[in-house]
Image: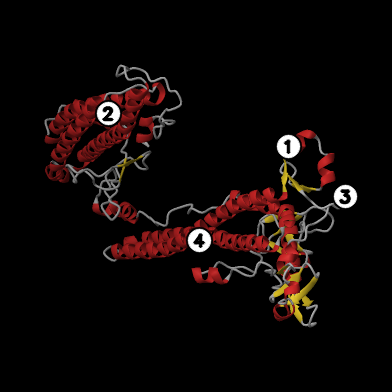
Amino acid sequence: MAGGIFSPLGSCSELEKANCHPLVCLLCHEPYQHPCLLDCYHNFCASCLRGRASDGRLRCPLCGHPSVVRGGTGLPPVDRLLQFLVDSSADSEEDVQCANCDRCCTKLDTMYFCNTCGQPLCAPCREETHRARMFARHEIVSLSKRTKDIHKKCPLHEEPYIMFSTEKKSMLCINCFRDMQGESRAHCIDIETAYMQGCQRLDQAVMAVKELQTSTREAIVLLKAMIEEVRNSASEEEAAINSLFSRMQEQLSERKKTLLKAVQSQHEEKEKAFKEQLAHLASLLPTLQVHLVTCSAFLSSANKAEFLDLGYQLMERLQRIVKLPHRLRPAQTSKINSEYRAEFARCLEPLLMLSPRRSIVGSAGGAVVLPGGQCSKTLMVPSCPTSDKMSTGPMVKKPTMHRYISTKVLLAEGRETPFAEHCRNYENTYRMLQTEIQGLKDQVQELHRDLTKHHSLIKSEIMSEILQKSLQMDVQIAAHYSAVEMMRSVFEEVWEETYQRVANEQEIYEAQLHDLLQLRQENSCLSTITKQIAPYVRSIAKVKERLEPRAVPGGTWPGDGASCEVPGSHTPTWARCQE
């Protein structure tokens, strides 16, 4: 993809070493000769790119991004900005002869220019010849500054530039200004003001590129860490699979090979994806570094006229680089999961007479895989200070949707069993809890609607009452969950004796626990929403009191521009909780 000249870097130190000179071509490693700019903002010499175009497209040798090539030359357009910097660099290395001692010095050496005499001077001659009183009024400036102060002239009128059009982004002489229409003259400012405004806008563009550079470096470090995590996770997963397999018989050998192959496939897929994203970001760093150095060199090399001639082109380029789609976040997680326990359980079902309906995974993740195959939704269970036993893990998968039907069928059989009696008691308690939770949900939804749409005043007592009821419901649900959990050992003894009938009871039981967890989740969501709404209620009340001291609580606030935005107001609150 990268044309064979670039490979992903292994460390941050290598990234720093890759930051080459901005005026040196990455292909020939020589100073640019007619630099061409690709669509990905990489630069190469025209001679290095000649002959690489195919079907009107030229693939970047560094990152592989295709660029559209127009014209018969088969080359991208010449980068005027980079060509200016190359020419400026060459000019700074030219030899300058002192007018007094004929000493040859480069412009990089300390050289001066006497504007009164119109001659260049070296440092010793400046001190010796111009130290006399007769030269006291001579204007002596740095040679480099004198070069920068030379203003360009208008090629059309041969007059010096004095104005700058912010509309056309071009410099104007006095004749150009006179020829403009009255509307366009309103967009003209003097050179000094235009230069100051341009510097400010360029500083903003540079800051945006620096932020992108920082984010890119952080993303590269993150991706490298995630690649290492992928390797570690793959090793841990393989070790766990091998440890479990060692306790099995020959019937598991074929399943073991399948699982290891799946892990290796995930490993290769994830590592490949991360490496591709890493290569993309690593190829982005030289571009950012080159343009930052380019900006610095441009500011130090260009005079005001040159800045106004090329500065906006540079600013536009920096803004486009920042707006390009950069994949800074990992597209997937580094966790490798083969669900080896479930696979081994399925393999052992014919041997150990395990129920295909019940599969509890109690390992590191703590996820409870409920019957019914692949689940349609995942419930995130928050931590609760009142009962830690309810939180079996960070994720609880939803059971099959016919739990209620299965319970009705079980009760309709009329069998007087401990589990049937438990289901009767459970259904009564669950309906009561569900009714209470639904009432709280309706209250919170109504408050949220009144606050976000109607901007109504809400009494703080109502918020406190809802929170108090939510805490009471949390205690009741936790107590009921503990009571149901305590019945597990009793039911497991019965399940061992009657396997066929218990398979359905196990499904109903796990669904009951899940429903309680879901109720608790809904209760936690409405508590969180109520707490989020409370500050806005108080804020609106205070604003209302300042604006209308006689306003009646519960009235409607006629949003006069001081409306408060509640997080998530554009999305239905309860729909977001269910997600």
Residue density around tag 3, few if under 14, some if 14–19, many if 20 or more, within 10 Å = few
- Whichever of callouts 3 and 4 sits on the residue coming sooner in the sequence is 3
Residue in the image at 52% along x and 55% along y: 211
What's the residue type where badge 3 is placed? Answer: Leu
The disc placed on residue 186 is: 1
* Mark with earlier residue (2, 3): 3
Please tell me which of labels 1 and 2 falls first in the chain: 1
Task: Indicate the secondary structure of the residue bearing disc 1.
Answer: loop
- For badge 4, the amino acid type reads Arg
**Residue assigned mark 4:** 217
Q: Residues within 10 Å of mark 1 (few under 14, many from 20)?
A: few
Q: Position of residue 101 (x, y in %)?
A: 78, 83
The disc, 2 or 4, on the residue closer to the chain's N-terminal end is 4
| Residue under pointer 2 | 405
Residue mark closest to the camera, 2 vs 4 = 4
Q: Could you tell me if the residues under marks 1 and 2 are in contact, i.e. CB atoms within 8 Å?
A: no
Q: From where the camera sits, is residue 1 visible?
A: no
Residue 46, placed above or below residue 467: below
Q: Is residue 12 left or right of residue 169?
A: left
Estimate the x, y position of residue 109 in percent, counting from the top left: 69, 76
Q: Circles 3 and 4: CB distance less than 8 Å?
A: no
User: Which numbered disc, 1 or 2, marks the residue closer to the eye?
Assistant: 1
Q: CA distance from mark 2 to mark 3?
A: 89 Å
Q: Could you give the CA–CA distance between mark 3 and mark 4, rounded to whole angstroms?
A: 48 Å
Mark positioned earlier in the residue sequence (3 or 1):
3
